[in-house]
Amino acid sequence: MPGFELWSDKERKEVNDVLETGILMRYGFDGPRKGIWKSKELEEAICKRFGCHYAQLTSSGTAALTTAMSALGIGYGDEVITPSFTFVASFEAILSVGAVPVLVDIDETLTLAPDAVRKAITPKTKAIMPVHMCGSMADMDALLDICKEHNLILLEDACQSIGGTYKGKSLGTIGDAGTFSFDFVKTMTCAEGGVVMMKNKELYEKCDGYTDHGHDHKGADRGADLHPFIGYNYRISELHSAVGLAQIQRVDEFLAIQKKNHGILKNLLAQVPGVSFRHVPDPAGDSCSFVSWFLPTKEATIAVVNEMKAQGILAGNFYWFDNNWHYIRKWDHLKKCYNIKFITSGVESKSDGAG
Ligand SMILES: *Cc1c(COP(=O)(O)O)cnc(C)c1O
């Protein structure tokens, strides 16, 4: 149940705190802001709720991925292995730091297939980026082993799995860094926003500077800050953080509704002959934001999807194989670029660069 559907007085109250002072920016203006620091408060709340040492808010989930990659030292020519079933933001972020997305197969978890990852490793591989799609998780133990063995960075795109866990740890806090998106349709929203979560202080300081033109944020006068490296403007605003601050206090309420509805739907579907479900490596950790299921054939799937649409049960195109935004088959805009490598079903292809 996405948080936007449960808009309440709590969100209005937090936003009003900011509107009262009129200080909409997260940095500086210490006097006039009268002690209102919504972004800082939200970062602290994220650390506490999801169990990470440091959190850096950003203007979007895509910006969070870009920030994490830059801070982790992923850059020009590095290969990042990521799944061919994700949202386009995952490869956009890889391209934004000059790295090469290497798109590989998924398995019945609907996330990275560890054996496909192994096959895609080259001397240029720098990182593995699993995407915890549709609320549930990748096989993290297998991926952690691969990273250890090959000395690779593990960056989790947990944008779609806020509140999910794997063996007791929040998704997004298990690898070297992880990200959430707080865009309008995610489990909790800021309207637009994202976060990088990490354990390492030095990495955090890089994220902190990178999202604000490289400011070191050491003094009270922004104009006198030093800039140890180049950054960009990926700042969140206080208005967005205010919405998020109300939502994070309610996120367990949202997750409980999701779990309940997921249970009802899954039990009903399980009674239908031929229906099977995705493999969830740690069933207790499913955030339950989606119910994902398989049918035995393509024909049956198309027929069922068409019937569900005709009956008004299904709004968008949730037949993922045929989806424009989430599956490689329809990413022609990407496939026309230079510098893309995709290895699906064991066959390596390279784009022709014609675009
Ligand atoms: C939503 C999403 C993002 C990007 O988030 P934005 O906040 O919309 O930029 C990245 N990856 C995945 C898997 C997503 O679902």
Image (tube, rainbow, N blue to C red):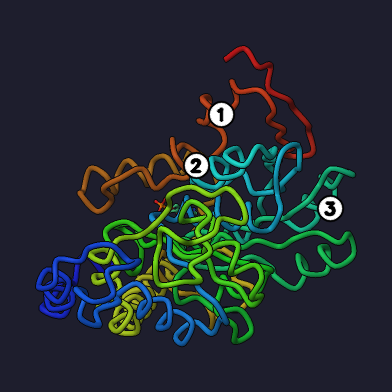
Point 69% across, 46% down: residue = 105
Q: Is mark 2 within 8 Å of ligand 1?
A: no
Q: Is residue 90 left or right of residue 13?
A: right
In the rendered view, tell whether residue 84 sits above or below residue 251: above
Residue depicted at 30% across the width and 45% down the height: 316
Residue at 19% over, 73% down: 32
Q: Position of residue 117 (x, y in %)?
A: 78, 52
Residue that label 3 marks: 118
In the rendered structure, which amino acid carries the disc numbered 1?
Answer: Leu
Q: CA distance from mark 1 to mark 3?
A: 23 Å
Residues at discs 1 and 3 in contact (Cβ within 8 Å): no
Q: Which residue is mark 1?
A: 334
Mark 3 CB within 8 Å of ligand 1: no
Percent across and percent down for residue 57 are 43, 65
Place residue 227 in its image quadrant. bottom right
Foreground label between 1 and 3: 1
What separation in Å lies between label 3 and label 2 (alpha carbons)?
23 Å
Counting other residues with Cα less than 10 Å from the Cα at mark 3, is it few (<14), some (14-19), or many (20 or more)? some
On the rendered image, what quadrant is the N terminus found in? bottom left
**Residue at the outermost front position:** 224
Whether pointer 1 and pointer 2 mark residues with C-beta atoms closer than 8 Å, the reply is yes
Residue carrying label 2 = 88
**What amino acid is found at the position of numbered circle 3 in the picture?**
Arg
- Residues packed near mark 2 inside 10 Å, few (<14), some (14 to 19) or many (20 plus): some
Closest to the camera, between mark 3 and mark 2, is: 2
